[in-house]
Amino acid sequence: MYRWLAGTAIFVALCAPAVAHAQPPVRHVFVIVLENKGYDETWGPSSKAPYLSKTLTSMGALIPGYYGIGHLSLGNYIAMVSGQAPNPQTQSDCQLFTEFLPGVPAPSDGQFIGSGCVYPAAVKTVANQLDAKGLSWKGYMEDMKTPCRRPASGTHDTTQEAKVGDQYAARHNPFVYFHSIIDRPACAKNDVDFSQLSSDIASPATTASYSFITPNLCNDAHDDPCVDNRPGGLVSADAWLKQVVPEILSSPGYQDNGMLVITFDEAENGDASACCNEQPGYNTPNPGGPTPGKGGGKTGTVVISQFTKPGTVSKFEYNHYSFLRSVEDLFGLAHLGYAGQPGLRPFGDDIYNATVAPAGGTPGARKLRARQLRLKAAPRRLEAGRINTLRVRTDAAATVTVGGACKRSSRRTRAHATKRWRIRAPKAGRSCTVTASRRGWSAANRTLRSRR
């Protein structure tokens, strides 16, 4: 009897219903999606991704109880942006780029009934919601090269396997599976190659409200080994994160109240566990696909933000529908599909546990008192096209990153010591950025303009 009561208490705590929480003033959400790894392999003591499993978790919140919603990959990507449940074609990663038919609304739950790959225009995504509210979104797809790249209707998807020099996978780019996106100019404008990320995040003004980032088939841990002879798996994914994440975290775009989420689409096929009272939907009896089960397995996720205490470990369970709901709540959007499931818990005070109180204060909110770094950078104007000697000084030990139109490089500085290094200035009229960052402090930014 006592054991039953204790187990019931734990179940109620983990599956607690949705509770309205004050939302932190997040302006920019970045999500990086990796591939096909269970919780123990990624986050356990023998992880081959120490930067992800140790360094990044120490900087934010680890969510051990985070789950995919099905197998194979594509159904998870679809769910993350639309709240639609899997169907037999998305469960097989849409080998043929077919229409989702009949594509009629279900009686409830915001679901659509049918099977296929490309959803009708009536099915909306978080990208459509952001557009409608005057907010911005971007999909950054590594190796895509051509914006909004996808197979022709009814044809075989030739990106199912990586090629040397082209490891893009359409099935890891959810935006190209919705007529509400691909039939509009917004797809070519916003669904772009990953190489555009660096220049976009060099300024808050050009940083999207929502950035969905997909590495290529080697860097997302999918292939092991990779077609270009790299090791692949978590080894290559960790190396990629070690390059990309510091650039994001030190960017002016992220420093403007950003939040970074690093997650996986699904666990390996042997794990079809689920959480959060996940519903199978109308189109498949078994979301686990090749594995009997209700979900996509336990993967884990990490969240990094100034609104999250470093070293946090959440006790609650979440899935991709929960994440979509969390993003929608941050931007004041309605809940799409199963993101609107009654009782589904979005990120709450287990994640937003270092909240900045808004003007006037909010009862119960804890104010984050981050010290402001001070940064001096000279010269303020660079000689275009020439090598310039940059002099940087900070009032505390920090990481200083040069970016923007300048080739990215980072150096460590000591308090009140001048650091010098040589940089090549871009063409006249373009700007370089200098960002000083230190854990627990507010970053400092400077803009250096090139002139003739």
Image (spheres, rainbow, N blue to C red):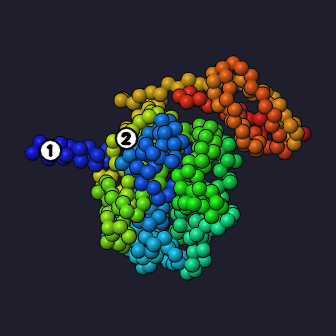
x and y percent of residue 440 in the render?
53, 28
Residue identified by numbered label 2: 314
**In the image, farthest residue toward the left:** 1
Q: Is residue 40 visible?
A: yes
Callout 1–callout 2 Cβ contact below 8 Å: no
10 lies left or right of 3: right
Which residue lies at the image location 65% right of the left edge and 50% below the top edge?
197
**In the image, farthest residue toward the bottom:** 154
Q: Secondary structure at mark 1?
A: helix
**In the image, farthest residue toward the top:** 416
87 lies left or right of 222: left
Q: Tell me the kind of residue under disc 2.
A: Ser
Disc 2 crowd, CA 10 A, few/some/many (<14, 14-19, 20+): many
Q: Secondary structure at mark 2?
A: loop
| Nearer to us in this view, 437 or 447 | 437
Determine the image quadrant of residue 97. bottom right
Which residue lies at the image location 58% right of the left edge and 69% below the top edge?
161
Q: Which image quarter holds the C terminus? A: top right
User: Which mark is drawn over residue 62?
Assistant: none
Q: Is residue 320 visible?
A: no
Residue identified by numbered label 1: 3
Which residue lies at the image location 32% right of the left edge and 55% below the top edge?
275
x and y percent of residue 1 in the render?
9, 45
Q: 369 above or below 107?
A: above
x and y percent of residue 247 in the render?
63, 42
x and y percent of residue 36 in the render?
47, 59
299 lies left or right of 403: left
Which residue lies at the image location 57% right of the left edge and 74% below the top edge?
157
Q: 55 above or below 188?
A: above
| Nearer to us in this view, 307 or 393 | 393
